[in-house]
Amino acid sequence: MLADYHVHTKFSDDSVYPMEDVVKDAIELGLDEICFTDHVDYGIKEDWDSGKPIIYKGGEPLANVDYPRYAEQIRKLQDLYGDRITIRLGLEFGVQTHTIPQFQSLFNRYPFDFIILSVHQVADKEFWTQDFQKGRSQKEYNESYYEEMLYLVHHFSDYSVLGHMDLIVRYDEMGIYPFERVRPLIEEILKKVIKDGKGIEINTSSRRYGLADSTPSRDILKLYYQLGGRIITIGSDSHKPEHLGAYIQDAKKLLKTIGFESFCTYKQMQPIFHPLSFDEG
């Protein structure tokens, strides 16, 4: 069983990958299942029907998913290709403490199969631009990142897994902040995730970003397993054809070495467990 559960298309403001091309490429790659998880980041982006002007950068709109078109396109692709690949309806929610009501409203509007809860910015300040880190010590911005995540898992429950849980590592110009210093916060987060029947993902984009460790780190994956966490999805975080399905098998092997015996796909927000086998090629 090969599934990619973190897939972006032209409906995300950072991708121009046509949705139907994604499906065709996934079939060519031998994937059994994909879930579309395009970006929604309230606080820094507007909805198409918000009545506010949409900002364009490099000819591409800085906007959230056009939800009606997105859902309709996925339905059409399910009809066209459903006999060759399973296609699920998902989104990646870039939630912040002050945007929870907007995400709650959005979740209630569509029959989602799967939701990734990600922390992409805090107080509308982005990590990749260093706006969030600016003026803070490495300790302060790392702890603040996980404190935001801890608040979110206690106050927003309509998600499936936490996405790229230690994303801050990718944008930490000071280097890797010691795991033991943030372990208490991470442990609190994971205990709440497990208690609520939620999960985490392993995000294979760490390979293309040249990171020294997996995303999340092996330390986090091991802690999650030791605490009893078993719900885990695998996603490439693809934005281009060359990203799709990349390093899925490697991620499965890593999970196996930690002790996991299965990974998950989702249907109607419920996890489906599959054995971690490696006979797919």
Image (cartoon, rainbow, N blue to C red):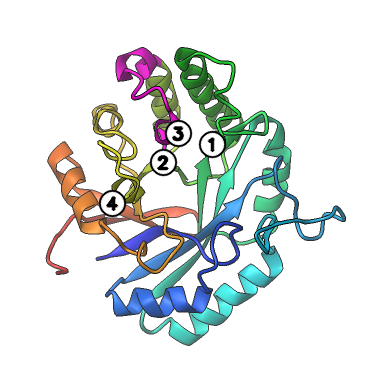
Magenta-colored stretch includes residue 215: no
Q: Position of residue 7 (x, y in %)?
A: 45, 60
State the CA–CA distance, disc 3 to disc 2: 13 Å
Q: Is residue 264 left or right of residue 73?
A: left
- Check disc 1: other Cα within 10 Å, few if <14, some if 14-19, many if 20+: many
Picture disc at residue 171? 3
Name the amino acid, label 3: Tyr
Q: Which residue is mark 2?
A: 164
Q: Which residue is mark 1?
A: 119
Which of marks 4 and 2 precedes in the sequence? 2
**Figure check: 19 above or below 223:** below
| Relative depth, front residue between 137 and 246 | 137
Q: Position of residue 59 (x, y in %)?
A: 68, 64
Which of marks 4 and 1 precedes in the sequence? 1
Name the amino acid, label 2: His
Looking at the image, is mark 3 or mark 1 nearer the viewer?
A: 3
Name the amino acid, label 1: Val
Is there a contact, CB below 8 Å, between mark 3 and mark 4? Answer: no
Helix, strand or loop under label 1: loop
